[in-house]
Image: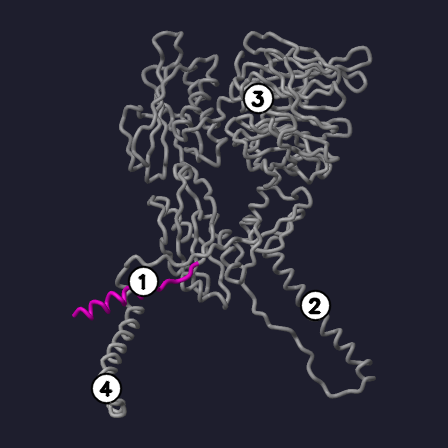
Amino acid sequence: MKKILFLFSLLIFVNSSASQDLSIVSVGKATLEKDHLFLENPYFKGWVSKSNKKIVENVIKLLRSDFSYYKNRFAVFPKKYRNHPSKKSVVEDVKYVSWQKKETDYLVKMDFSSSVSKNEGLRYVARVYSINTKKVIRELQGNLFKKDWRKEGHYLADRIFHSITGKKSIFKSRVIFVSDVTSTGRGKKRKTRKEIYVVDFDGANRQRITHHGGIVISPAISPKGDKLVYSLIKKGKGKKRIELYLLDLVTKKRTILSRRKGLNSGGTFLPSGDEILLTLSNLGNAEIYAMNLATKNLRRVTHHYASDVDPSVNGDGSVMTFLSGRSGRAHIYTLDPSGKEKSVKRISFVGRFNATPRFSPDGKEIVFSSWLDNRFDLFKINPDGTGLARLTKDFGSNESPSFSNDGEFIVFSSQRVISRYRAVQNIYLMDREGQILGAVVKDFGNCLSPRWTENFTGF
Amino acid sequence: MKNLKANLPLFLEDSLVPYARWSFIVHFFIALSIIFVPRVFDLGQEMPKITQVVSAIRVDLVAMPKYTLRELKKLSAAASAAKIIPTKDKGPTYLKKGKQKSLKDLLRGEAGKELSVKAKGKTKKTAKRNKYAKELGGLILQGNKISKGWAIVGDTREMILDEFGKYMASLPDYIRPNWKLPANLMKKKLNCRVQVFIGSKGELKKAKMFKSSGNGEYDRKAMEAVRETSFPIPSKNIKEKARKGQILLGFPL
């Protein structure tokens, strides 16, 4: 018996040693499956005036429009908006099973009611339901006023987005840009004027910021959205001067930061908001410096006999990307901006002329424009020089890219030649993969140098 | 056994027979266990040796990319959708041996014949090349030269792949379009491995969860991706390995 037991255990040991060789291959990263979001028509509690109902209708359309920007993330239902109010209030129970059968992932219900006081506008209560987990994930309350229903609508959309994804959206963002719409005359009599404007990310609510009556270029906005830096080209007696200005958007106070000989331009804020990086050429060729806004003290960042321009920093300010001619052609480099010529690395090796490199907020990509096929197109590259990819093609001449605050979108200017003497330049929006979503600013003179801002104060 | 006993000296006869008997029994049971025990027991088998296949690509960047990201994705999806059927290698074509001729005859006639046979061979080759070029949808991209491998993205380490390795390296392009996750699972760093058994016609015979991610929904999505995929037909030389389930798919690895 002992011998039999010994044999049996020996056999199991022998067998357990036998195995099959396998080969494994990585399928890689999954693509995101869209969430089905159902925005139910509003429920009116009590009497609501016709004009207020119109505002509510506009807000619902705005919510649908906002979420449509994230088409890779959300499928919004119903597919067609029909203006008839819901018969069910948010307080009524939701039949989760029936919504699950319709493959809905999230449901948003809203109640609107007239306030007792005229000053409070329309009151709303919105609930966001997760159908899969069968619970209310967020309840939102607020007021809608006729004068700024768009702002409140974007704010509501952002809170709904955040309750589902846990992240900030672009719905409260704005874009600053330069336009020559105030220019006068034609041909030799043309007087070019360029000023800075701001617009909502969806192209609405356009406002003028500067009133120099001159040529303003290269705007940059602080992370808090309370300061604006830009260059103003002034024509003196036969000589042009480029001066660097700081505009406090809250107090409207304007300060000259630099009026040195040569270039004073290309300013960009460091993440602290207290310092900027700028390009100066008073010592000969163009070099990049860091300037403290309070003291105006300069610290040199680049030091090379070739021109170094166009700085942009990543989210934490640890890496700066810039354009340099040190290889003989305009190529993209990175360095550590905390020192001078610190850890300089060349990252682009192809392209006849590369320009305007801009970091994504997460620091994982740099988008830039490059001259190819007789026009500029947009490309992206990783900070280590790998992953060069083309974003635009057959869409005019595309320049000055700027990432959105969440890194999912890129705003840029695009020029189209209409005739031998005329070209138009508009601002467009695309996603990170290069799909053009539409125009942000169109038919407003020649628009260029767009800059995305999550926060914008003072207006 | 009796003859053996008869021929052996007495002292050996007594000592050897029990050992011979036990040797026979042990070997018999070993043979049985190799066949039956794996099907009955699952007793913590030793992990099999797993070799990772890395798609071999060398990308020499000589110019700015011609195609945009979206165009490349469309090309990749089209290439995956077109099943690449391996053709049989017919081997070289030989000239038929004719009657023995003099050198003069050879110079007059045979040289002409040779040229015409070679020309025919060339047109067959170019026709095949054109057929492949159409099927792969012009994957050779200006500025990005593909020197080895099947995929257009992947690790840039050089690796010499055999036929089975090349087949495995091509699989992610077929599966990836079906590999989707909801946002809540994308955030989590999960991974699972699925063992697939592929038939001689590229049909999925069986899919088994080799290593679970610990999340039921994640595993279900990976199995869904495998079941929705039309696998390429394995060639004659590797179909046995594909049938026996020597292929592991890592989601993501």
Q: Which residue is mark 4?
A: B11
Q: Are marks 3 and 4 in contact (CB under 8 Å)?
A: no
Front-lying residue, A87 or A126: A126
Query: How far apart are the two marked residues, 4 and 1, measured between alpha carbons?
Result: 39 Å
* Residue topped by disc 1: A16
Mark 1, Cα crowd under 10 Å, few <14 / some 14-19 / many 20+, is many
Q: Is residue A11 magenta?
A: yes
Chain of residue at mark 3? A
**What residue lies at 43% left-to-right and 13% top-to-bottom?**
A145
Q: Residues within 10 Å of mark 3 (few under 14, many from 20)?
A: many
Position of residue A282 relative to residue A315, above or below, is above
Of marks 4 and 2, which one's residue comes earlier in the chain?
4
Say which element carries label 2: helix
Real-space Cα distance between discs 3 and 1? 62 Å
Disc 1: host chain: A
* Cα separation between marks 3 and 4: 97 Å
Residue B235: where, in percent of width, then height? 51, 65
Mark 4: give few (<14), some (14-19) or many (20+) Cα within 10 Å.
few
Residue type at mark 4? Phe
Mark 3 lies on residue: A270
Under tag 1, what secondary structure? Answer: helix
Tag 4 secondary structure: helix
Helix, strand or loop at label 3? It is loop
Amino acid at dot 1: Ser
Foreground: B215 or B178? B215
